[in-house]
Amino acid sequence: MNYEIREMLPKDQARVMEIFQQGIDSGIATFDTELPNPEVWDSSFLNDCRWVLEDESSKLIGWCALKPVSKRECFKGVAEVSIYFDQNSTGKGLGTLLLKKLIIDSENHGFWTLQSNIFPENEASIKFHLKNGFRTVGIREKVGQLHGQWKDLVMLERRSEII
């Protein structure tokens, strides 16, 4: 099967949100419990470094984007990775294609550190990040609640070797 990575376009918003809803429904991908409105979602991500993956029928099956970790100038090169796939497209190695594109693009835009915060029970996502050059920084214990339960986060980061 052939896949295409391309820049995320405004026309992709509905499908991106559908995939994000699957992440919410999984209970192990995000603290979000409902979809934000499209404007809130859009404004929370950087305008650069937004990519989608389409299958050979041009169906959008995955997306990735970066969120700033701070508005402070000293952290302008640090961003948080969001990467989500349609539940029917996981476990096929496609995430690596999309994440590698995001890494190259992030470095081209001057990012020196990418980070991810992942629930410990999301073992597949942790392994995926480790396989793609991230390292475990630590565990943030009881950092927030989801459905009334305290949740830990495994913090991972990838430092650029060229910036």
Image (spheres, rainbow, N blue to C red):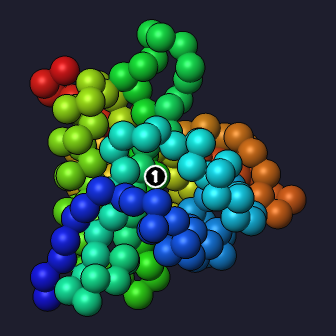
Mark 1, secondary structure of its residue: strand
Q: Is residue 98 left or right of residue 39?
A: left
* Residue at the (41%, 87%) spot, across then down: 88
Please give the residue where the numbered disc 1 appears in the rendered image.
Answer: 82
Q: Where does the image place residue 11, in percent across and percent down from the top left?
A: 45, 67
Residue pictured at 52% horizontal, 52% vertical: 118
Q: Residue furthest right?
A: 148
Report x, y in % for residue 98. 26, 60
The answer to whether residue 82 is left or right of residue 3 is right
Please state, as top left, top right, bottom left or bottom right, where the C terminus lies in the image. top left
Residue at image position (37%, 58%) is: 8
Q: Is residue 133 above or below residue 7?
A: above
21 or 142: which is nearer to us?
A: 21
Q: Is residue 155 left or right of residue 43?
A: left
Amino acid, disc 1: Ser
Graded by Cα atoms within 10 Å as few (under 14), some (14 to 19) or many (20 or more), the crowding at tag 1 reads some
Q: Residue 107, percent across and down?
A: 22, 32
